[in-house]
Amino acid sequence: MKDLFRLNNQVAVVVGGAGGIGEAIALGMGQFGAKVVVASRSMDALKQVAKRIADETGVETEAFQVDVTSEDSMKGLVKNVEDRFGTIDILVNAMGVNIKRDALEYPMEDWDRIFDVNVKGTMIACKHFGRVMKKNMQGKIINLSSVRGIRGFGGGNSAYCGTKGAVELITKALAIELAPFKIRVNAVGPALIITPGTIHIKEKPELADKYRSVIPLNKLGAPEDLIGASIFLASEASAFVTGQTIYVDGGLTAS
């Protein structure tokens, strides 16, 4: 039981691993013993993240470039990981974008872009990494959802809410379809997380107070807050858990 949360010798791939949330989750995977692959579009950022994980944890790390909206690119990523490590045990889909626009003026090119990354990208990764897991008759997939996948939010978030609602149901559908192959598919659904893209909220006291006021724990989320839930879903501790979303939200969805 003492090793229930350990990921020793497992291979964890974090797509979107150069972002604030993805980097934190990837680091957590390494801290619990997994070999870590980070993947995204920016190779320079990926190399820095991979080096940080290796330096802080001592685990084997690798960085590969990928375009999540391209099946050929994702196939190439899968091949690169298999060639490097021989197998794939854990997939974390941490990629995501938000393009805020007034609903009645929403440009469809922006709508298509956010759905391409958040929904199509998630499905492409699940499809091709899932094939490896099916062959191995085991695996863990963790998708990045959001509280905005189950609650409506204004402020130009109609597309983002739509994508995260889709991720929620894709997670459930895949959990059922892949269960015969001992592949668990779950999600984490954070409230607002302060990353380089949202740091402006924390830096403006009135805006930060506005966001904190709806969180029962009265704090803004940090990328590190997602590590615990992600390790649980990646480890044997969650062997009987699939098709679920853990909301890391300070109690927001309970209110």
Image: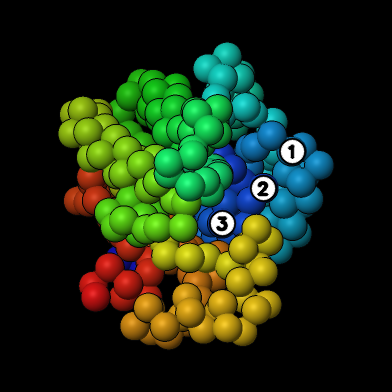
Residue 154 location in percent, x, y?
A: 40, 58
Which residue position is annotated with label 2? 18
Q: Which residue appears at 55% of the width and 60% of the height? A: 28
Q: Front-most of 229 and 102? A: 102
As shown in the figure, which amino acid type bears the numbered disc 1? Answer: Ser
Residue 45 location in percent, x, y?
A: 76, 46
Which residue position is annotated with label 1? 42
Residue 47, above or below 154: above
Residue 81 location in percent, x, y?
A: 59, 29
Q: Which corner quadrant of the image does residue 245 belong to?
A: bottom left
Residue 254 location in percent, x, y?
A: 23, 72
Residue 255, above or below 183: below
| Mark 1 vs mark 2, CA separation in Å | 7 Å
Proximity of marks 3 and 1: CB atoms separated by less than 8 Å: no
Q: Residues within 10 Å of mark 2 (few under 14, many from 20)?
A: many
Q: Front-most of 255 and 28? A: 255
Disc marking residue 220: none
SS class, disc 2: loop
Proximity of marks 1 and 2: CB atoms separated by less than 8 Å: yes
As shown in the figure, which amino acid type bears the numbered disc 3? Answer: Ile
